[in-house]
Image (tube, helix red, strand yellow):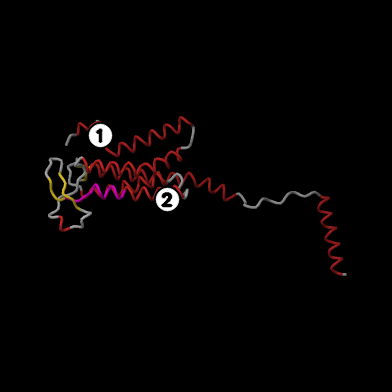
């Protein structure tokens, strides 16, 4: 394991975790410089994030990276779940087809965020929802990866980074909800029906006179 290449972006670096962190920092900086809320930018990133995930998994498939655990034979599993693929040393063997699974998950997340965008739902939450789903699914996939990665407290380092991004996504969802709650409370306090206009003393006497006339007509 080449720990000296962790900070080298041309050598892989922090892979998709670094891309997400850098993208969020860049979007926050642009929103601050232009004086616009961060939430519109985050919703756009939320729609682009699963596309990036699909591209990353596609690249992993082509580069023999993030390959799955070796299995005994292809006949023991459904055709979509396994594939004959090389490892980092070029040894071809039947393995779990993790890149394809990752691309399918990315497509599902993209469709979900796309539907929310079309329906204009979950405004301000879309990026955090996409990040939570992708980081959680990637953390699960990491249990079945066959490539070698640094272990930290007995777990893969990239899996711990996945869980860290999942925690950040949950914090982001909670933060957006707390920010929107005071605004919603103010809107609830506003009556949907405007109060009746103030009436002058003359108008009240006029209405009183009309009431008397109506009552007399009813008696007659």
C-beta proximity under 8 Å, tags 1 and 2: no
For residue 185, side relative to residue 196 (left or right): left
For residue 16, side relative to residue 37 (left or right): left
Residue count near mark 2 (Cα–Cα under 10 Å), binned few <14, some 14–19, many ≥20: few
Dot placed on the residue nearer the N-terminal end, 1 or 2:
1
Q: Which residues are magenta?
A: 95-105
Image coordinates of residue 33 in percent, x first then y, are: 46, 29
Q: Residue at x 13, y 41 (%)?
A: 90
For residue 219, side relative to residue 16 (left or right): right
Q: Which residue is mark 1?
A: 13
Dominant secondary structure, magenta: helix
Q: Quadrant of residue 165?
A: top left
Q: Residue at x 21, y 32 (%)?
A: 5
| Circle 1 SS class | loop
Image coordinates of residue 123 in percent, x first then y, are: 46, 46
Q: Which residue is mark 2?
A: 115
Image coordinates of residue 73 in percent, x first then y, are: 13, 55
95 versus 88 height, above or below:
below
Q: Is residue 49 magenta?
A: no
Residue count near mark 1 (Cα–Cα under 10 Å), binned few <14, some 14–19, many ≥20: some
């Amino acid at each position: 394991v080449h720990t000296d290449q962790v900070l080298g972006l041309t050598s892989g670096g922090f892979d998709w975790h670094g891309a997400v962190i850098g993208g969020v920092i860049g979007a926050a900086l642009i929103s601050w410089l232009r004086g616009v809320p961060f939430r519109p930018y985050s919703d756009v990133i939320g729609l682009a994030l699963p596309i990036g995930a699909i591209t990353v998994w596609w690249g992993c498939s082509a580069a023999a990276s993030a390959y799955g655990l070796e299995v005994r034979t292809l006949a023991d599993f459904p055709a979509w779940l396994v594939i004959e693929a090389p490892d980092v040393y070029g040894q071809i063997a039947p393995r779990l087809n993790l890149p394809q699974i990752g691309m399918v998950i990315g497509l599902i997340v993209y469709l979900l965020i796309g539907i929310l965008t079309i329906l204009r739902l979950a405004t301000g939450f879309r990026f955090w929802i996409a990040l939570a789903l992708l980081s959680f699914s990637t953390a699960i996939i990491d249990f079945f990866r066959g490539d070698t990665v640094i272990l930290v407290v007995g777990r893969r380092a990239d899996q711990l980074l996945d869980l860290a991004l999942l925690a950040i996504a949950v914090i982001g969802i909670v933060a957006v909800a707390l920010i929107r709650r005071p605004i919603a409370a103010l809107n609830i306090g506003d009556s949907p029906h405007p109060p009746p206009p103030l009436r002058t003393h003359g108008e009240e006497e006029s209405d009183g006179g009309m009431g008397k006339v109506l009552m007399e007509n009813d008696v007659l």
